[in-house]
Amino acid sequence: MSEQEDKRLIEEFLAGSEAAYNMLARKYRSRIYWHARRMVGNHEDADEVAQETLIAIYKKVKDFKALSSFSTWVYKITSSRSLNLIRKRKVKNFVTLDFLKDKQNKEDIIKNFEDKEKLKEVEKRLMKLPDKQREVFVLRHFEELSYNEISEITGQAIGTLKANYFHALKKIVKENGDEK
Amino acid sequence: MKNNDTILKYLSGLLDEREKANFEKELVENSDLKKEFERISKELDDLKITPEVDNVYFANLEQKVKSKSTGKSKTHNLGFSLGLGAVFSILFIIAVYNFIFDKSGNNVNSDKITSTIVLSSDDLADSYSIDDLENLGISTDDYFSAGLSELSDKDIISFLDNTTFDDISESLFSDISKSDNFSEMIDELKNLKY
């Protein structure tokens, strides 16, 4: 039903309906933001990725071939934009935890202080994972996607994804164990 | 530790069917394994927090995206750039023209000066910076992009400040107007003056 609804909205948008795009954007904006946020580790960069992704959807939806689901396509754009931004930041800033801390201390959209602190801890842990492991971990653990869907998004073989997920889990769990 | 690895392999889908069946059987029978499995599962679940966010953000996000999606990029709008170039060239010509009369008060043949500068206005649009224009008293928020400043405003101002045009002949303007660019034109004027 959801995929059919996406298909209908895409057709309407391509026929010129801005309202259809707005509905698509509203449906996916939160998922886009949170996937980006877990990938990049702070609000400011997640905001940039979310904007870029929504603009890309607006401009490139005509290229969407429906070979995969629309949501997979959206995750693919979000993931690749996130990884691009991470690479750009690494080149520019030599990403360190101090750098991340600076970013985390800037403007945020989390209302509750306690939630904000918890999220910071999660982000810190996620950012310690290599990018590819983090991507698989986020898509599987948070977005609860199947390996087949993640394979469509990342272009990686399922065996590689499982291995990456295993190593990510090992680091995350070890990390938790170390802190107790 | 061995248990941990098996649990993580199970969670990752790395166990084959037989290993998976054995693990699930042991999970029921072995209380230590079950306890460890539950601890790890809980630790992982605790990461899944999606805090309440300020919804204004998402409303604003839509607006920002909409304006960026439909808006035309300033830097890629050739028509706008050319128009802007033309406007600043004209402003520059007017400023220099006024400046000459304010500073010198001479009976310079204004048509000749203007025509000389007009010949160079295309070069200006390409090579002159907005800072330079602003230094000459033209106020603007925008700028021309490329290669500024071979030609400096100091050259122009110093020349204009110290020059009277009584001695500048018609033939001089004729020579100047043959210059390929504004920079050369100023150099020629300076050489002739000093």
Image: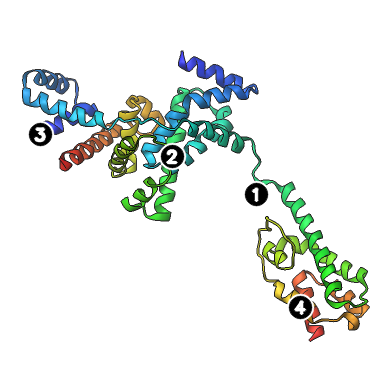
How crowded pointer 4 is (Cα within 10 Å; few <14, some 14-19, many 20+) is rated as some
Earlier in the chain: of badge 1 and badge 3, it is 3
Residue B71 seen from this side: yes
Task: Please tell me the numbered disc located at residue B2.
Answer: 3
Q: Secondary structure at mark 1?
A: helix
Q: Position of residue B173 (x, y in %)?
A: 88, 75
Query: What chain does mark 4 sit on?
Result: B
How crowded pointer 1 is (Cα within 10 Å; few <14, some 14-19, many 20+) is rated as few
Q: Residue at x 90, y 84 (%)?
A: B167
**Which image quarter is the C terminus of chain B in?**
bottom right
Amino acid type shown at disc 3:
Lys
Asked if marks 3 and 4 fall on the same chain, the answer is yes
Amino acid type shown at disc 1:
Thr
How crowded pointer 3 is (Cα within 10 Å; few <14, some 14-19, many 20+) is rated as few
**Residue under label 1:** B75
Q: Secondary structure at mark 2?
A: helix
**Which image quarter is the N terminus of chain B in?**
top left
Asked if marks 1 and 4 fall on the same chain, the answer is yes
Earlier in the chain: of badge 3 and badge 4, it is 3
**Left or right: B23, with B177 as reference point:** left
Viewer-nearest of labels 1 and 2? 2
**Residue under label 2:** A46
Viewer-nearest of labels 4 and 2? 2
Amino acid type shown at disc 2:
Ala
